[in-house]
Each structure stands twice: as C-alpha cells, then as structure tokens.
Amino acid sequence: MKKILQTMSLFIMVLLGLVYISDYNYLITAVSNIYLKGHTTAFLSDYNHFDNRKLPASMNPMPWPLHSKFNEITLSKEQEKIHFENQTVALLIIKNDSIYFEKYYDGYGVDSKSNSFSMAKSYVSALLGKAIMDGYIESLDQPVIDFIPELTGEFASAVTVGDLASMASGQKWDEAYYSPFSVTTAAYFVKDLTKVILEQPINETPGNKYEYKSGTTQLLGMVITNATGKTLTDYFYENFWNPMGAEYESLWQIDSNEKGIEKAYCCIASNSRDFARMARLYKDYGKWDGKILLDSTFIAKSLKPRFNESPEYGYGWWLKNYNGHEVFMNRGHLGQYVLTFPEEDLILVRLGHSKGPKGDPGDPFTPDIYSYMDLALELNSNIGFP
C-alpha cells in the first residue's frame, strides 16, 4: 500500500509539473479557485479568489427613492418556486425610478456583492460610446488596428470597433464555458490575458454576421484602454459610476499580469441597486438628472439589431420584443439579468446561482428570462399610479 501511495504521489507531481509547463498551466488556478471549491464553473463570489481593481462608491451617492407602494405586494407561490429552483439571490423591481419591490435570498442583502459575468459587456459598449463622444475614437467605423497594430489574422485590417461591439468580429474563439480546455476558460484564469487575446486571429470576414464571442468584447476593452490611456475601471468610474451616484464600492476583476487589465467581457462584482443604474441611463437616452453622460444617438443605435437575422442583439445589449413590449437587457452567466422595459419605465434586476433549464436550443433566450419578464409585467399592471 505504501508503494502504491508513493507511486500515485509521484504520478500526480509529474502530472502537475507537465501541466505547469504546458499551455494549460491556467488549469492549476482553475482547480484551486473553482473546482476544489465544489463548483464546475465560475460562481457569484469567486471574485474573492482573483485580483480586482476597486470601483469606489460615488463621491455623491444617490440612493434610489422608495416607491409609495414599496414592498406592498408579495410573490405568489408559483413565482417564489421559480426563484427557489433557480437559486435567486436578489430580485429588484424599479418603477418610475423608484424601488417598488426588493427581496433577497440565501443570505444576500442590499450591499452584497455578486459577479456580473457578461452583464459587463454592456458597460464596455457604453465606454465605447463615451470614447467616441470624447474624441478618443473617431466612430464605429474606425479600424481596430489603429489601436492594436499587433492584431493578427487575414482580416485584421478590416475589423472595426463597431464590429467588436456588435459581435461581428470574425475572431477565432471557442465560447465554451464548461470545457476546461476552451479559450474562454483560459481567459478567465490566465495571468496574461492580453497574450491570449492576441493569439486569436481575425480569421473570418468581419461585419457580416452576429456571433457571440467573449474574446471580442475583451478586444474592445483593449481598444478603449489604448485609445484613452486609462484603465477601464478609471474611465468607467469617471464617466458613469461616479456621476450616476453608485452607493457601494464594487470591484472589476483583472488578470494577474504586472499591469493588470480588466476582464472586459465579464466580472464586475457589485449589487442589485447599482447594477440597475446603467439601465436607467439607457432608458433615459444618456441623461442622468438632467446631465448628458452619453450620446443619445449612440444609445439609440445600440438598442437596435445590427443584423436582421439576429434581432436579439444590438451593440452590447440583448434585445427582445415580448408580447408587444420592447425590452433591452444586460445578461450574464448563471442568470444575471437587468431587464428594462423603457415604455413602461420599468427595470427588473435578478441575480442568482442558476438560470435553470436550457429550453429550446433555437431560442437565444432561456425560459427563466420569460418568467422574469412575466413577473415584471404582472407587477407593473398591479401598481397603478403612485
């Protein structure tokens, strides 16, 4: 038995050594930070195990006012069942810019941080709009190589910043969250994220079709950083987080390289109330308390599909016409959502551990999203007027 244990130990040491010197050495971090903690993928509080850049609370915090009918209603048993099964941690409904309903689960509260995952992609799109507004970037048509000349691939000179924002980059990428060997997984754990992104060439004609790729938003984040000379966190705080009055300190996950770049495609650790602020800004076409923070024409373009064949996506935002109601949304891994109904002046935030069953593979939206839209519209119809 002793010899067997010694042999096994030697085998494991050799295996770890081989992994360490291979292109898959990030798996050691993955095993340590995710798999040994009982998870098969990234999870809501995993920001505690990574490097982060602080996103401070606003210097002039602006708490959401409470609606005159705040929390007067209770969810039905059927509605609560959905949140129980999908392991919701936060549910927030804002009507007319006032909190109408708010509930937390699983020990979470108003100031609990939770990983945004890909909801951050919409924030990066907003930063692109701001960089254009500030003159750092000429337009959506400016070539990416103006900012990243080392970009490779047959079509590297053809891809534009607008192609990146609309997920039409032509970039080589494997969007597989649960495979430990995919580039998406590697991007989450590697120490040098820039290196990984630059190893993915633009190998297809850009601007022809929508194809969701996290690496494309990461490339866009690199463009914005190079164009402005500022980190994404600093540029975001300066132009949005601070003037919008964010109440709580948040975090933006970065790689472990010496300079540290934000994971632009994901990973802002914040709370339900502050996650709702960007939705309000877009609902109000770039104005916040009378001040213009983002160009309204950029927002209008962002909230319309670029391709008729893919009506579910604009420029960094998910889109849906649901039973006659226009909806735009932030959307993230495991069911992180901010659903906005602009005509109803209604915002729903849902954060949680799971999005439940996958549903129809031909539908870009999972069944849980429809249940949350139904809930928002049902509660809206019961509100009446404040």
Image: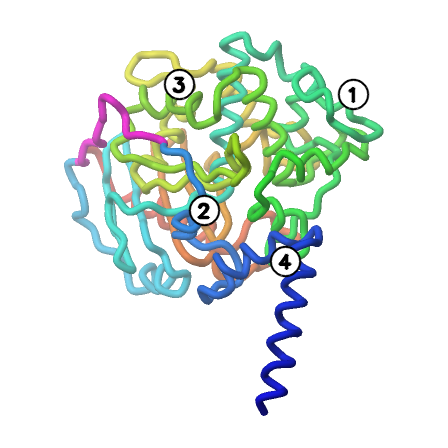
Between the residue at mark 1 and the residue at mark 2, the CA separation in whole angstroms equals: 34 Å
Of 120 and 183, nearer the camera is 183
Between the residue at mark 3 and the residue at mark 1, the CA separation in whole angstroms equals: 30 Å
Q: Nearer the observer, disc 2 or disc 4?
A: 2
| Residue 296 position in % (x across, y down) | 47, 15
Give the quarter of the image for residue 11.
Answer: bottom right
Residue at which label 3 appears? 239
Residue at which label 4 appears? 180
Give the quarter of the image for residue 272.
Answer: top left
Colour scheme used in the picture?
Answer: rainbow
Disc nearer the start of the sequence (1/2): 2
Between the residue at mark 1 and the residue at mark 4, the CA separation in whole angstroms equals: 31 Å
Residue at which label 1 appears? 157
Q: Are marks 2 and 4 in contact (CB under 8 Å)?
A: no
- Read off the magenta span: 55-67
Disc nearer the start of the sequence (3/1): 1
Residue sitting at x 36%, y 56%: 88
Residue at which label 2 appears? 50
| Residue 62 position in % (x across, y down) | 22, 26
The amino acid pointed to by label 1 is Ser
